[in-house]
Image (tube, grey):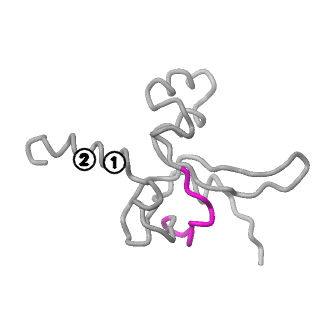
Amino acid sequence: MDERFDLVYRLLDEQIVDVDGRRCGRVDDVELIGEPGAPLRLGGLLTGRGAYAARMPRRLRTFARKLFGRDVRGATVQHIPWSQVEDVGATVRLLGRADDLGLGHDDRALEHRFARLPGG
C-alpha cells in the first residue's frame, strides 16, 4: 500500500471534525518530524489563528504575527497528534473529542462575544 499523499492538497485548509461530528477548526499547518538525511514523518496538525503567520510570505509575517498571534505553542494554536487522526477524506476526522484534545478555544471565546449581538 502506498502511504504517500500531497500534504498541501489533502490537508491544508481542510475542515477538522471530532468523533462526535463537531466541527473544531481547519488544518492551518502540519508538523513534520525527522532527522537530517532521514525520511520525514507527519507528527501532527496545527490549527488556530497563531498558525497562519508561518504560511505568509516572509515580508508579511511580522504583520501576521501581530494580527493572528505570535507563539506556535501559544493559546491560539492547538496541536493535534497524527495518532488522533482517524481518516482524511472530505474532512479530517479525529478519534477523540474536541474538548479532550484542547480544540475550539478560539471558537468558544468568539461565541460568547457574538451571543450578545442582536439575533445571536
Q: Which residue is found at the position 46% from the left and 39% from the top?
A: 75
Location of residue 71 in the rendering, given as x and y in whole percent from the top left corner: 54, 33
CB atoms of marks 2 and 1 within 8 Å? yes
Q: Quadrant of the N terminus?
A: bottom right
Q: Amino acid at mark 1?
A: Asp
**Residue 52 horizontal side relative to residue 21, left or right:** right
Find the residue positioned furthest to the bottom. Answer: 1
On screen, 93 above or below 77?
A: below
Location of residue 84 in the rendering, given as x and y in whole percent from the top left corner: 57, 66
Q: Which numbered circle lies on residue 44?
A: none
Location of residue 101 in the rendering, given as x and y in whole percent from the top left corner: 47, 59
Location of residue 99 in the rendering, given as x and y in whole percent from the top left corner: 40, 59
Find the residue positioned furthest to the right. Answer: 37
| Residue 61 position by quadrant | top right
Q: Which numbered circle lies on residue 111?
A: 2
**Residue 2 horizontal side relative to residue 26, left or right:** right
**Residue 91 horizontal side relative to residue 21, left or right:** right
Gap between marks 2 and 1, in whole Å? 6 Å
Q: Which numbered circle lies on residue 107?
A: 1
Q: Which residue is found at the position 79% from the left and 54% from the top?
A: 40
Q: Which residue is found at the position 50% from the left and 67% from the top?
A: 94
In this view, the residue in front, 93 or 105, is 105
| Residue 21 position by quadrant | bottom left
**Residue 33 horizontal side relative to residue 61, left or right:** right
Q: Secondary structure at mark 1?
A: helix
Q: Secondary structure at mark 2?
A: helix
Query: 10 Å neighbourhood of mark 2: few (<14), some, or many (≥20)?
Result: few
Residue 89 magenta-highlighted: yes
Residue range highlighted in magenta = 79-91
Q: Amino acid at mark 2?
A: Glu
